[in-house]
Image (spheres, coloured by chain):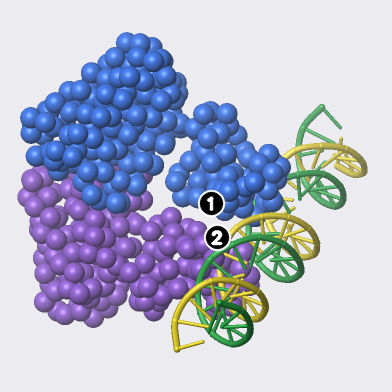
Chain colours: A blue, B purple, C yellow, D green
Amino acid sequence: MKQPPAAERVYQHVKDGVLERRYEGGSLLTEGELAEAVGVSRTPVREGLLRLEAEGLIRLYPKKGALVLPVSAQEIADVAETRQLVEAHAARKAVPASPQLIARLEELLEQQRRQVADGDFAAASVTDRCFHAAVVRSGGNEILTKLYDQLRDRQLRMGVAVMYAGPERVAKSLAEHAEILDALRAGDAERAVSVIRRHVEWAADLARGEVR
Amino acid sequence: MKQPPAAERVYQHVKDGVLERRYEGGSLLTEGELAEAVGVSRTPVREGLLRLEAEGLIRLYPKKGALVLPVSAQEIADVAETRQLVEAHAARKAVPASPQLIARLEELLEQQRRQVADGDFAAASVTDRCFHAAVVRSGGNEILTKLYDQLRDRQLRMGVAVMYAGPERVAKSLAEHAEILDALRAGDAERAVSVIRRHVEWAADLARGEVR
DNA sequence: CGAATCCCTGTTGTATCTATGTTGTGCGCA
DNA sequence: TGCGCACAACATAGATACAACAGGGATTCG
């Protein structure tokens, strides 16, 4: 009945809740509530919360509860800066691009186009993320890859999902991906970096607009 | 009687053990052992292990135990690359350097000199680390600061402590710090970056020599 | 003699229980 | 009415107890 371990279920539940803004920033979750909500005991709840804290999504206050960290201007800036750093580094390192990488990116871009055409923006958003992650992953650095994933999670929480709110935004995103791919194909690392810079900065701006 | 929480004690115990090579890479720790060793129950042990896993020092295998991750060539390379990236970025961002930062670095360098003169290499190693961390911290990016701290921990585990084994190594380290400070003071970011590159690469080479 | 199976032991995963600390509230007093 | 203190409610931190699972070795059957 329950394939995934209880701690994992709690982790996903809270993470989804935070990312989807069901649990708002600033609210105080208690272990008991979560235990009841997910249907497990409090022990796995603590384990899940611990992982979330390590990822920077929540903050555990002794004897008080788990505070869902509100996104601060500082955090938006930090995430954006770090994304820039990691992704730009990955792009430079990816040049000259291997045929495998190019093929993978083409595939992802095509997939995203289809999803957009089908109106499935949620899926397109996931593919968007995969596109960037593929570039970073191609660097072969596990530390950076993991870090980058966490950054994307945190950015998701900032409401960057609204990036896929309107058709013009989707088109912009798609166009920039195409340009990144193009620059990579041409071996022009600096052009790819500059597009990435714009892309990330745009996401950060959206987040800033969202938060306040 | 017990100021620090039990989970924290476990965390420190295992971390120190791994960093000081008391627990060798590849060994399998069980919760029961650790619980007895530290003198607490298994509950806080699990919490501590979970944190360690998030930091990449150990790996939890279901129903088997906590594997102390052996340092791999891949990990050495990844840590070095990431350190380069973060520290170089921080140095560039730190230029032009604020008087506060310069003062702090001068203070740390002086302190390290004293410690070396006193023969207290352990303390000098800690100060060394503070020096680099100060540069990164000056960037004001909490994500990068935290990441950098974790990287230094992991590098410690790779036996980079032997960096402070001989007088000539200590002298080299000290000289490079002085050069970094000098470049920063002069506003020459690229010189600082190149020294940092050498410095980190040197540490990685030591690690490679240590491991095999 | 070899291989498959079954049981036994050790370890984690989860639940429950106790102790302790923190917070907010309400009562009494000035 | 306002301030302060004590108490009660609640939340976590830690310990213990129990269940489920994996792996190894002995045993047994072919």
State the CA–CA distance, disc 2 to disc 1. 7 Å
Dot 2 alpha-carbon crowd within 10 angstroms: few under 14, some 14 to 19, many 20 or more: many
A106 lies above or below B58: above
C4 left or right of B199 in image: right
Q: Quadrant of residue C11?
A: bottom right
Relative to A13, residue B153 above or below:
below
Residue assigned mark 2: B47
Q: Where in the figure is residue A21, as x and y percent of width and height?
A: 53, 28
The answer to which of A52 and B197 lies nearer the viewer is: A52
Residue B123 in the figure: left or right of residue A185 = right
Q: Amino acid at mark 1?
A: Leu
- Where residue B50 sits: x, y (%)? 50, 59
Q: Residue at x 63, y 40 (%)?
A: A29
As drawn, D1 above or below B77:
above
Q: Which mark is residue B114?
A: none
Label 1 packing within 10 angstroms: few (<14), some (14-19), many (20+) = many
Q: Position of residue B185 (x, y in %)?
A: 12, 49
Q: Look at the image and tell me whether residue B145 can be seen.
A: no
- Judge whether residue A12 can be spotted in this image: yes
**Which residue bears the numbered disc 1?**
A50
Examine the image and state in which quarter residue B25 appears: bottom left
| Image coords of residue A162 (percent x, y) | 42, 20
Nearer to the camera, A154 or B66? B66
Quick check: marks 2 and 1 in contact, CB under 8 Å? yes
Q: On what subunit does the disc labeled 1 rest?
A: A
Q: Which chain does the numbered disc 2 sit on? A: B
User: Is disc 2 in the same subunit as disc 1?
Assistant: no
* Amino acid at the residue labelled 2: Glu
* Quadrant position of the C terminus of chain A in the picture: top left
Going 23% across and 25% down the picture, which residue do you hit?
Answer: A177
Residue drawn at x 20%, y 75% as measured from the top left? B212
**What secondary structure is found at the residue carrying circle 2?**
helix
